[in-house]
Image: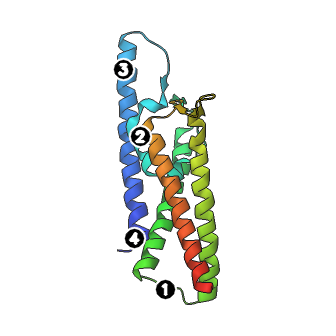
């Protein structure tokens, strides 16, 4: 089976399972709080399984534009989840398409059009990777006069590392593709 079909399918199934587990995590916390008569809303970050899925699909997560500290349940959660699932499908379809092209599953007949589209795709990868890294930049604050960085901890360190890894990977993959194309034309 081609990766452009298999990767989105597996990713969406995994996302649905992790979202369900995350919702169960929050419901357990709400049940405990109800027994203690504690009525404060639960932060969405308590659904660690959901954030694990966001870390796996960081480029799709960035399309949500959500801020940390969102309270659960949100208004219209299925509309928001649908948008996220569509972004996951598109993201993994494009990744699978690139793997299929590299493995020789499908060759582009029109080399000129393929080269132009490849350059556009590489530039988009670099820019989106920089955008992902920029999203995590507010998570660190420089300490004055010491040159050190202090984490703000709005997100967990593993989540920050995953998003930065995705961003760096996209920048490196896009740059490599652009440099390889420039070397071929020179």
Residue at image mark 1? 107
Q: Nearer the viewer, mark 4 or mark 2?
A: 2
- Mark 1 nearby-residue class (10 Å; few <14, some 14–19, many ≥20): few
Q: Quadrant of residue 13?
A: bottom left
Numbered label attached to residue 158: 2
Please tell me whether mark 3 sits on a helix, a strand or a loop: helix
Point out the tag, 3 or 1, that comes first from the N-terminus: 3
Query: Is 73 situated left or right of 9 in this image?
Result: right
Q: Quadrant of the N terminus?
A: bottom left
Name the residue at 40% across, 48% down: 16
Residue 159, percent across and down? 45, 41
Mark yes or no: residue 63 visible.
no
Residue at image mark 4? 3
Point out the tag, 4 or 3, that comes first from the N-terminus: 4
Q: Do the numbered discs 1 and 2 sit on residues whose CB atoms are within 8 Å?
A: no
Point out the tag, 3 or 2, that comes first from the N-terminus: 3
Numbered label attached to residue 31: 3
Q: Nearer the viewer, mark 3 or mark 2?
A: 2
Residue 92, percent across and down? 46, 62
Using the image, determine if residue 6 lies above or below residue 14.
Answer: below
Q: Nearer the viewer, residue 39 or 146?
A: 146
Point out the tag, 1 or 4, that comes first from the N-terminus: 4
Q: Nearer the viewer, mark 3 or mark 1?
A: 1
């Amino acid at each position: 089976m081609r990766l452009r079909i298999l990767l989105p399918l597996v990713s969406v199934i995994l996302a649905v399972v992790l979202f369900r587990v995350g919702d169960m995590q929050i419901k357990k916390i709400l049940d405990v709080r109800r027994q203690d008569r504690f009525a404060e809303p639960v932060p969405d970050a308590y659904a660690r399984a959901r954030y694990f899925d966001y870390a796996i699909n960081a480029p799709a997560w960035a399309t949500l534009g959500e801020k940390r500290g969102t309270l659960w349940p949100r208004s219209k959660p299925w509309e928001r989840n649908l948008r996220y699932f569509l972004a996951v499908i598109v993201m993994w379809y494009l990744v699978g398409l690139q793997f299929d092209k590299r493995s020789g599953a499908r060759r582009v007949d029109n080399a000129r059009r393929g080269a132009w589209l490849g350059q556009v795709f590489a530039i988009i990868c670099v820019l989106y990777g920089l955008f992902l890294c920029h999203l995590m930049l507010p998570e660190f604050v420089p300490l004055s006069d010491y040159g050190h960085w202090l984490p703000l901890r709005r997100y967990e360190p593993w989540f920050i590392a995953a998003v930065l890894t995705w961003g760096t990977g996209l920048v490196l993959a896009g740059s490599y593709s652009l440099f390889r194309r420039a070397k071929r034309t020179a």
